């Protein structure tokens, strides 16, 4: 997915990957406290808050708004960083704003002496993120009309000064199209861009460095245009943390990891969504690999009684818990271990900032349930924390790491260090007691749910969602730690518990399996469902071709399960062709037995082509199998077969796309370029669909 990275990649999660964070994603948002109190409602828009950004800026005395279009939190994080830096270095009065929270018809009245910044992730096939859809449609509209009646020809935005940065992935055809188009539309409307339109590339893994390289000349342009003066950036806390000696963690009002008030107050209430997860039972779980050194989990998650629903092809989000091992490391190195269960109240010191977790709470709960403590560290955060180092020597090393890109990569990025691991190594275990906890809240990304392509059919099991998740574990030569994926190792622990291990502790990670106040006991996990456009044709007699190596097969298990059930029920089901790939037949061939049952139901209409990359003398991949069966693929596409790809976004999906064009060209005797065009048309009409991450 073209995304926000560590936004992850929304798909991509992207969470992964990238980056690091100087200030965190959500605290700098505005208006309503998600956990309770809200603003007065007089004169306010649909969500009970003002949708007038100009008024909002006036009221809160701001002269710079940083809008973000973010799917998984990375763009939001960069927006916060820009806001924070604009304030601390240049004295701008900044605020961050979710694009979805405002109206844009009055942008023609945006004051000349103020600045608008747009931080925009491109999602999927060049689409806006969910929260940017309305803005994108408005600003790109051919017959745009502003509140005073101005139209495009009047250059209505001639007073608007703006800055843009985009987050994209160059492995996608529509690389950074969101920022490119918005920049084009704003210019067309007469607005004036300061600095260049920045583009970060998650595909090349250079998002953070692209951002750092773009922002200095951008600030120089802003300083010149707005007549600002750079000042020495002094750290100013965004949050006030007050310890509450009169309260204990047992107190009913204290959040011990509950995601919101509703969860704190007892029985969970719907609707369940991205801000209110359902604590779902894991009904069943088992291991899919037979190899000893790798794990892949099949899990059945119950959603009965929750009012959650899904349709085949949707995604489920799992809300992770950090491992005890990393939580301990984090609290120890910050010198907070002895007071980990002390109750703290956290308050935003700026009216437009918001605390990214509910309060009062404890250090332990914040670190365990709300912070992405395992993520990579950003160079910018290292520079900021340097001033709080436990000794001059350590400080000097931090400053060096913060200012030397290559050195930083070699010492930190390439060794896959998270923040606590880095601090621990640099100070040789001496605690960093001077680091303000506010800076930690600002600097560490808010924990993100991870998405999984649902591997069951909603027709077959509407109350149970299956997932197929490979457990992340990777070691780098020279790295002091083995990188353990946050969510998948947590799920592995849940599976171990379900299979009778009273103290599941995969790799010594030690998870708090029973959750806050034991609310996850009986093996539960917080989830929500995300609907997708990755769908079977509504007419089951249409043929389908699916390409899904590894866990990319997840949604195709659902598709085949559904078509097998339809065939059993007497429906006319068309040809169903699946290309799957794995290392070895007897190691990681996912659902190898199940396919035979589906074959019984679907008969010759179900065909599976499997590529084994480590069996013979040559590595065989799904692409090879596609070439081998190219003639059949072309014939089915001529019969209007739907073509689906799922799995690795960076290489496989792209290669499959190119290859399909070649196959079509070859068997229809057309030039290759024509084949490519046919695939493009298929994509535009949904005959070609991708679910990639
Ligand atoms: P994380 O902790 O998020 O780590 C993941 C990766 O991030 C690591 O392997 C590493 O490359 C990088 N990383 C993390 N920390 C660091 C660090 N400190 N330094 C350097 N690099 C780091 N997965 C499946 O198995 N099955 C599916 O069906 C599936 N479907 C998906 C569908 C969608 C739409 C999306 C977006 C993703 C899907 N994924 C799927 C991927 C899944 O969401 C998770 O990304 C994956 O399971 C890893 O999560 P984790 O928390 O275990 O790992």
Image: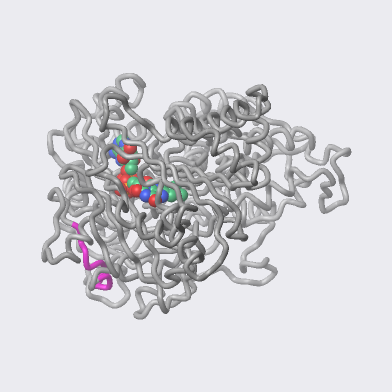
Would you place residue 615 above or below residue 321 in this image?
Answer: above
Ligand 1 lies in which image quarter?
A: top left
Q: Is residue 190 left or right of residue 226?
A: right
Question: What colour scheme was applied to this rendering of the protein?
Answer: one colour
Would you place residue 683 above or below residue 225 in this image?
Answer: below
Q: Residue at x 47, y 75 (%)?
A: 307
Q: x, y percentage for residue 563? A: 49, 60
In the image, the segment drawn in magenta is: 511-520
Q: Residue at x 59, y 37 (%)?
A: 634
Q: Quadrant of the C terminus?
A: top left
> Can residue 356 be seen in this snapshot?
no
Would you place residue 605 above or below residue 116 in this image?
Answer: below
Q: Is residue 482 left or right of residue 561?
A: left
Q: Is residue 513 magenta?
A: yes
Q: Residue at x 38, y 37 (%)?
A: 17
Q: x, y percentage for residue 534? A: 54, 52
Majority secondary structure in the magenta region: loop
């Amino acid at each position: 997915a073209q995304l926000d990275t560590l936004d992850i990649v929304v798909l991509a999660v992207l969470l992964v990957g990238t980056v690091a964070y100087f200030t965190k994603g959500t605290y700098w948002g505005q208006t309503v406290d998600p956990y309770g109190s809200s603003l007065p409602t007089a004169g306010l828009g649909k969500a009970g808050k003002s949708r007038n950004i100009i008024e909002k800026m006036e009221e809160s005395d701001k002269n710079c708004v940083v809008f973000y279009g973010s799917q998984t939190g990375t763009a939001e994080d960069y927006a916060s960083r820009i806001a924070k830096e604009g304030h601390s270095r240049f004295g701008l009065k900044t605020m961050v704003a979710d694009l979805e929270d405002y109206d844009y018809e009055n942008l023609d009245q945006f004051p000349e002496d103020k600045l608008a910044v747009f931080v925009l992730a491109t999602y999927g096939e060049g689409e806006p993120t969910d929260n940017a859809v309305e803005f994108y449609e408005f600003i790109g509209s051919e017959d745009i009309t502003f509140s005073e009646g101005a139209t495009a020809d009047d250059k209505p935005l001639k007073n608007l000064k703006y800055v843009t940065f985009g987050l994209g992935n160059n492995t996608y055809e529509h690389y950074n199209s969101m920022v490119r188009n918005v920049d084009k539309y704003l210019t067309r409307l007469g607005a004036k861009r300061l600095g260049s339109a920045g583009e970060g590339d998650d595909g090349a893994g250079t998002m953070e460095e692209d951002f750092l390289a773009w922002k200095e000349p951008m600030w120089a342009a802003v300083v010149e245009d707005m007549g600002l003066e750079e000042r020495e950036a002094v750290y100013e806390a965004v949050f006030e943390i007050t310890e509450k000696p009169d309260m204990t963690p047992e107190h009913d009002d204290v959040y011990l990891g509950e995601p919101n008030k509703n969860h704190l107050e007892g029985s969970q209430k719907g609707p369940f969504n991205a801000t209110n997860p359902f604590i779902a039972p894991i009904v069943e779980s088992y291991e899919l690999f037979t190899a000893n050194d790798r794990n892949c989990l099949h899990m059945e998650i119950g959603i009965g009684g929750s009012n959650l629903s899904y349709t085949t092809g949707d995604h489920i989000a799992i809300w992770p818990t950090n491992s005890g091992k990393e939580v301990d490391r984090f609290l120890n190195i910050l010198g907070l271990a002895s007071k980990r269960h002390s109750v703290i109240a956290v308050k935003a010191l700026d009216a437009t900032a918001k605390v990214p977790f509910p309060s009062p709470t404890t250090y332990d709960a914040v670190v365990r349930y709300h912070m992405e403590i395992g993520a990579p560290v950003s160079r910018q955060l290292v520079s900021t924390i340097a001033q709080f180092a436990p000794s001059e020597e350590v400080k000097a090393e931090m400053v060096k790491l913060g200012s030397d890109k290559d050195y930083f990569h070699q010492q930190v990025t390439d060794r896959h260090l998270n923040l606590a691991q880095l601090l621990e190594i640099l100070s040789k275990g001496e605690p960093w007691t001077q680091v303000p906890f506010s800076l930690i809240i600002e600097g560490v990304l808010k924990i993100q749910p991870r998405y999984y392509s649902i591997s069951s059919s909603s027709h077959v099991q509407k109350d149970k969602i299956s997932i197929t998740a490979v457990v992340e574990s990777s070691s780098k030569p020279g790295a002091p730690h083995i990188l353990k994926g946050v969510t998948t190792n947590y799920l592995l622990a849940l599976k171990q518990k379900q299979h009778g291990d009273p103290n599941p502790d995969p790799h010594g990670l030690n998870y708090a399996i029973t959750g806050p106040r034991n609310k996850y006991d009986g093996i539960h996990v917080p989830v929500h469902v995300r609907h997708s456009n990755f769908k079977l044709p509504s007419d089951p007699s249409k043929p389908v071709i699916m390409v899904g190596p590894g866990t990319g097969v997840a949604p195709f298990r659902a598709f085949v399960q559904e078509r097998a059930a339809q065939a059993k029920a007497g429906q006319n089901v068309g040809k169903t062709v699946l290309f799957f790939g794995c290392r070895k037949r007897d190691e990681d061939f996912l659902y190898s037995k199940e396919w035979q049952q589906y074959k019984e139901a679907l008969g010759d209409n179900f065909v599976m082509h499997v590529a084994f990359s480590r069996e013979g003398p040559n590595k065989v991949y799904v692409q090879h199998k596609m070439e081998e069966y190219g003639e059949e693929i072309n014939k089915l596409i001529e019969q209007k077969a739907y073509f689906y790809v799922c799995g690795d976004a960076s290489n496989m999906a792209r290669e499959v796309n190119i290859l399909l064009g070649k196959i079509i060209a070859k068997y229809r005797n057309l030039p290759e370029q024509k084949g490519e065009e046919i695939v493009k048309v298929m994509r535009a009409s949904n005959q070609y669909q991708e679910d990639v991450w």
